[in-house]
Image: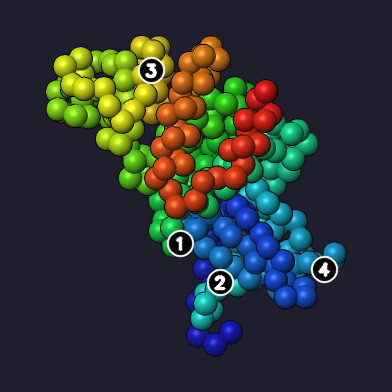
Amino acid sequence: MGNQTLFTTRAVVIKTQDFKENDKLVWFYTENMGKITAVVRGAKKSKSKFLSLTLPLCYGEYLMYKGKNLYTLQEGRILNSFQGLLDNLDKLTYSSYLCELVDIACSDEESNEYIFKDFVTTLYLLNTDALDYELLVRAFEIKLLRYTGYNINLDSCSVCGKKISTSNYINLSNYGGVCDECPKENGTYISKGGYNALRFLKNMHISKLYRLNLNSEIKNEIERVTTFLISNNYSKKPKSLEMLKYIKE
Ligand SMILES: [Zn+2]
């Protein structure tokens, strides 16, 4: 191993790919270094100690070192495999979407402890069935957008800057509400209920979401806003969005 330094980090497996004959490439979203790619030697062998540690969604503590191009996984310990999420099509689809979204929204080795915390909390809540899956995912989307530079401004007009308490329009190129006087352009109308729910989802900690109960019309309005912002601001559109639509029907 030469002079390579070992380090430990908590992380979630967000994507995997076969690599060479027996190895796997694993994309981790880590607590300390953001998204990283690691090679896991022998991970495809059935008796490998790495098999369960590198399943999609696995949350663990990982010991790695950085090589010339990639990280290498040395050891690991599972904190929660979240494999219960795979038993149910809705949960599987939502959790796969979360992983894809984190992969698309985050650049390599750019750490953000808020994204990490909210990501893990969202997986825990999805796993326990404590909350409406859709609301949970919408809240995570809004927070992730905010942490990656697309903060939805709901407290002042996104055109003139005047303070507003509510609005019936979201300007999607300015990421925010529009006051009564400003033109309603480049965006979408939204009900007062939808606007307030959007603000609630943005400001409320994910673990407090059980206080919110929204009808499907409002949930659809919010989805329209987040889907637009995600599809138009990140370099790739998440493929699992289509699957999410399908399971909702
Ligand atoms: Zn205005």
Q: Which residue is mark 4?
A: 45
How far apart are the alpha carbons under marks 2 and 1? 12 Å
Q: Earlier in the sequence, mark 2 or mark 1?
A: 2
| Ligand 1 neighbours mark 3 (CB distance < 8 Å) | no
Closest to the camera, between mark 3 and mark 4, is 3
The amino acid sitting under disc 1 is Asp
Q: How is the image coloured?
A: rainbow
Q: Which residue is mark 2?
A: 71
The amino acid sitting under disc 3 is Ile
Q: Residues within 10 Å of mark 2 (few under 14, many from 20)?
A: some
Q: Earlier in the sequence, mark 3 or mark 2?
A: 2
- Picture quarter with ligand 1: top left
Residue at image coords 58%, 38%: 241
Q: Is residue 140 left or right of residue 14?
A: left
Position of 180 relative to 27 (above/below): above
Q: Earlier in the sequence, mark 3 or mark 1?
A: 1
Q: Which residue is mark 3?
A: 190
The image quarter containing residue 156 is top left
How far apart are the alpha carbons under marks 3 and 1? 35 Å
- Give how far across and how far down residue 49 sits, in percent: 77, 64
- Give how far across and how far down residue 12 sits, in percent: 59, 52
- Give how far across and how far down residue 172 sits, in percent: 33, 32
